[in-house]
Amino acid sequence: MGQQSPPDRSDWWRDAAIYQVYPRSFADGNGDGTGDLAGVRARLPYLAELGVDAVWFNPWYPSPMADGGYDVADYRGVEPLFGTLEEAELLITEALELGIRTVVDVVPNHVSDQHPWFKAALAAGPGSPERELFHFKQGRGEHGEIPPNDWVSEFGGCPWTRIEDGSWYLHLFATQQPDLNWAHPLVRSEHEEILRFWFDRGAAGVRIDSAALLAKDPELPDFVKGTDPHPYTDREELHAIYRSWRAIADEYPGTRILVGEVWLPDAERFARYLRPDELHTAFNFDFLARPWDAAALRESIDSTLALHAPVGAPATWVLCNHDVTRTVTRYGRRDTRFDFAAKRWGTPTDPALGLRRARAAALLSLALPGAVYLYQGEELGLPEVENLPLDRLQDPMHFRSGGTDPGRDGCRVPLPWSGDRPPYGFSQDSTAEPWLPQPADWAPLTVAAQSADPESMLSLYRSALELRRTEAALHGDKFEWLPSAGEVLAFRRGDLLCLVNFGAEPAPLPEHRTLLLASGPLSGPALLPTDTAVWLRVA
Ligand code: GLC
């Protein structure tokens, strides 16, 4: 461990700023147009300067990329497009030397159809022990031609695929992602070993993909409406699984964290995953999905804090990730909520309005008590790319919707680093074509262009993250709403106030000592314009 390793704070994760790297699109170190670990290593100083405490990497494992790496063929390796295991180990160490911890993504619900277990199961045939690691079933109907139940894939369409011998296998996501049978002891022990494998290599935590879906009702019954949760969601067995994971994490020094991707509408059920002997935190999708509206966001903040308090877990604040529409685009629309089911081509957006709100949202979320997640490019104010050529799209969500859902490629376009035309410094070799094309008008959004501009989104994020680190008021749990007029959210944390104006009219600022940061220009010395946020020191 190097000189500048992070201070040994066992509670580092409770108020951490965690940056999400989508390795394929962060930076390309070998010039082939695909991001890789060499690219990340070269850009670690950028992350240190940005001021983040940890990085969560989307899957970097060997994968046929049927679902952007969430189809894992080997949980103990690195995809050759991205580099080698040795580079991953170096990356973890080098990041730590700059004070940045590494969180890896684990994908327990399913494997790739190219994973050795699934290949062995196909080869071994019906009734074999190899097939018991998955959900193979006979179909219904006279000739077994009807899928075993009525479930619908998370990506749309039927989650069952029939193979040559006539049996069907379950895949809640794409066909190439067969679901594991979590009732099998080998599935459990294998994943416990995978956790140890990455903790042994210095990972400070794991992000658990589709964490509420692993266990299924053993009968795999039809879903009877009104009997929520669904037979494959939020089952009691999951808690024992995560307790055993927590016991493993707790064996390691320095606090290794478990972060769940838990999409559950029921707040009380959600909180059960965060009990002291289960996961450390989970992503706050409620906050992410809310519209740009004072009452809606206030309600989300209140319910978030209320549901976390009894289990003693910190809240998390998330505005976007690799699965959802980029904030700048979403907030510029008429309907500013996020909803997978509502994603459609050609939804108009006002980018200037979206950017103004995204800047205010940054100050709002970075001032709240708890941990915060930033998705790469969020700090640059990148928009969703909505005009990718159809023949370049990769996302199975798009294809399985029959083309009605634009899919998630638009938020995964490679980052612009410098220069005035693609690949904007993304690839070392400027002739390499990025795996997804970048827009022709991204020159003002590059890291280089924004670094030189004190008014840029990047400068705002840098300043806000620095204050978040240095201002004692922003540490810990203290939080108190202040009375405010109209559509203004105002809260206090120690001697620091955060105000956000969602209303159409400028709002008066309260008396204060210092204006620490504003998301945009004020309308007068003491007037907060619409869609603008400020941080003030009062005492
Ligand atoms: C999670 C991931 C998403 C992936 C899916 C299947 O929701 O965030 O990107 O497609 O799981 O692994």
Image (cartoon, rainbow, N blue to C red):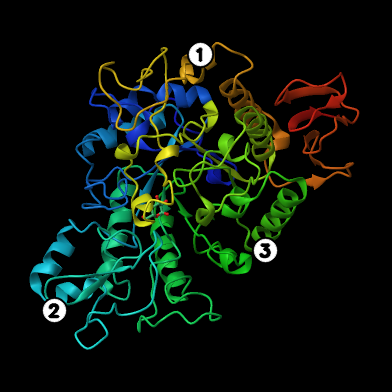
User: Which residue is painted at 30% across and 47% down in the image?
Assistant: 69
Could you tell me if the residues under marks 2 and 1 are in contact, i.e. CB atoms within 8 Å?
no
Question: Mark 2, residues whose alpha carbon is within 10 Å: few (<14), some, or many (≥20)?
Answer: some
Residue furthest left as drawn? 123
* Residue at the image position 76 percent from the left and 45 percent from the top: 294
The secondary structure type at the circle numbered 1 is helix
**Can you identify the residue that label 1 sits on?**
449
Query: Quarter-wise, where is residue 214 in the image?
Result: bottom left
Decide if residue 188 is on the left or right side of residue 45. Answer: left
**Total marks placed:** 3
**Cα distance between the residues tagged 2 and 1:** 59 Å
Q: Is residue 418 left or right of residue 267?
A: left
Is the residue indicated by label 3 positioned so its CB lies within 8 Å of ligand 1?
no
Three-letter code for the amino acid on which mark 1 is drawn: Ala
Q: Amino acid at mark 2?
A: Pro
Label 3 sits on residue: 310
First in sequence: mark 2 vs mark 1: 2
Which is in the foreground here, disc 3 or disc 1?
1
Quadrant in which the C terminus appears = top right
User: Is there any visible trace of residue 282 in the rendered image?
Assistant: no
Q: In 3D space, how far apart are the residues under numbered discs 2 and 3 (Cα atoms)? A: 48 Å
- Circle nearer the N terminus (3, 1): 3
Q: Position of residue 177 (x, y in %)?
A: 28, 59
Above/below status of 174 relative to 56: below
Q: CA distance from mark 3 to mark 1?
A: 45 Å
Q: Which residue is mark 2?
A: 126
Residue 475 drawn at (x, y percent): 67, 39
Residue 418 in the image: state x and y as whole percent: 42, 15
- Left or right position of 272 against 84: right
